[in-house]
Image (cartoon, rainbow, N blue to C red):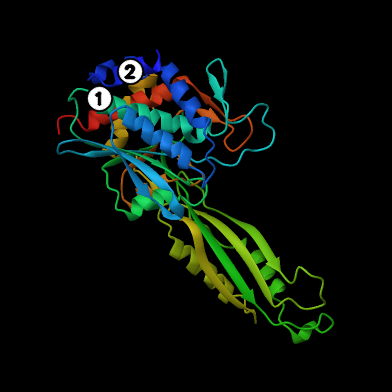
Amino acid sequence: MNDDQQLQLSKQPIGLADMRGIIDVDEAAELTTKLVGIRSYPGEEAAVQAFVADWFEQHGIAVERQPTRDGRSNIIARIERGPGATMLFNGHVDTVLAAAGWEHDPWRVRRDGELLYGLGVADMKSGVAAMLLATRALAHARHDWRGTVIATSVVDEEAFSVGARALVDAGIHADYCIVTEPSWHHPCLGGVGKVLVVGDVVGKAAHGSLPEEGINAAVAAAQFIVALDALPLAGHPQLRATQSLLSLHSGSPQYVITVPEQARFVINRHTVPGESGAAVLAQLQSLAGGLGSPARFALEIQPPYYPAWETPPSHPFVAAFGAAYQRETGRDAAYGYLRGVADANYFSADCGIPTIVFGPDGGKFHQAGEWVALPTIAGCARVLVDLTATLLAGR
């Protein structure tokens, strides 16, 4: 099917039952290949966002270009079919930097049977492609559903989630949300949060031969770090809270015989649902205060901050998703939970939107040889359409 035929077909009203003829593997491969071919490191997403906006507009779907900080923009497509519930699809277009070890140009997709290889092909340009195809199918379907569908292509997820934060700060609202990160075999109902705590320790300088006249900030920081291991971490049936020291610096980069008067450490805490950043900070401040150190500790949370999130398995959204997933795959959904953070944290925890992470099957994220299973791109799009038609039917 050539581009003209695809465009003509996409403009014809269709029934949702006909979507397998509209969302096909070859078009999913072509769209994913085009997205991967546009380099889009965090801060460099303008070209790929222009492609996304143009794709929507070519298929008769108007878009809003929502400015974010740093002069970038999200692309928001909105389809309104009268009163009813709202479904939000979300995907990010930025990728991590290309790792060493690629055997081919990472921006030129290589196909091997049913697998596609390329930078960001799984995380998550195939998920963006599925979102685009599903949105188009819903836009041009006959009046089988009522309500609103919003598709958001955002920037910067791999760094500070600037795009998702812009949506949240602008008051994005929906009744349901699907984030199309790769999770075909284990759609996710929750995930850890992230609290980044920076600690500054202030001591007193002294000559290195007279350490008793100073307060060694490096030693005080080390005492704090050693004491971290005794801290109790919150529990959760499906998720594990973790804590790790990311960096510790003290003293002068130049050789001097001086007791270091300053030190800085950075701690990463992955939290579980029910645990707040404020609680983590208070726990660490209490630890510092209990050391009896003559040094002064100043601790604060710095970005990026992600609250932990969870959609209850008993929620009707989960039941509807499970039915759509079963119709597409022939098996029951085996739900999982994210061990890392994503934009889903904000939509669920900050906006209160019931959220599921579900996207194509892929692997080797952030590594050379990243891959996605081609049939699952179109399959993901079909699940999104089926789910939306079910939840927004007859409203």
Image position, residue 60 (x, y; %): 28, 29
Separation of marks 2 and 1 at Cα, in angstroms: 10 Å
Image position, residue 271 (x, y; %): 48, 54
**117 displayed left or right of 256:** left
- With respect to residue 380, does 4 lie above or below? above
Mark 2 closeness class: few <14, some 14–19, many ≥20 residues within 10 Å: some
* Residue that mark 1 sits on: 140
**390 displayed left or right of 56:** left
* Residue that mark 2 sits on: 22
Name the secondary structure under disc 1: loop
Q: Amino acid at mark 2?
A: Ile
Give the number of callouts: 2
Residue nearest the viewer, comparing 308 with 233: 308
Image position, residue 381 (x, y; %): 37, 26
Residue nearest the viewer, comparing 102 with 220: 102
**201 displayed left or right of 375:** right
Q: Which residue is at a point 69% across and 66% down the rendered structure image?
A: 249
Q: The C terminus appears in which quarter of the rendering? A: top left
Q: Residue furthest top?
A: 1
Q: The N terminus appears in which quarter of the rendering? A: top left
Image position, residue 244 (x, y; %): 61, 56
Residue nearest the viewer, comparing 15 with 276: 15
Q: Which residue is at a point 47% across and 38% down the rendered structure image?
A: 47
For residue 191, what is the image quadrant? top left
For residue 246, what is the image quadrant? bottom right
Q: Residue furthest right?
A: 209
- Contact? badges 2 and 1 (CB < 8 Å): yes
Q: Amino acid at mark 1?
A: His
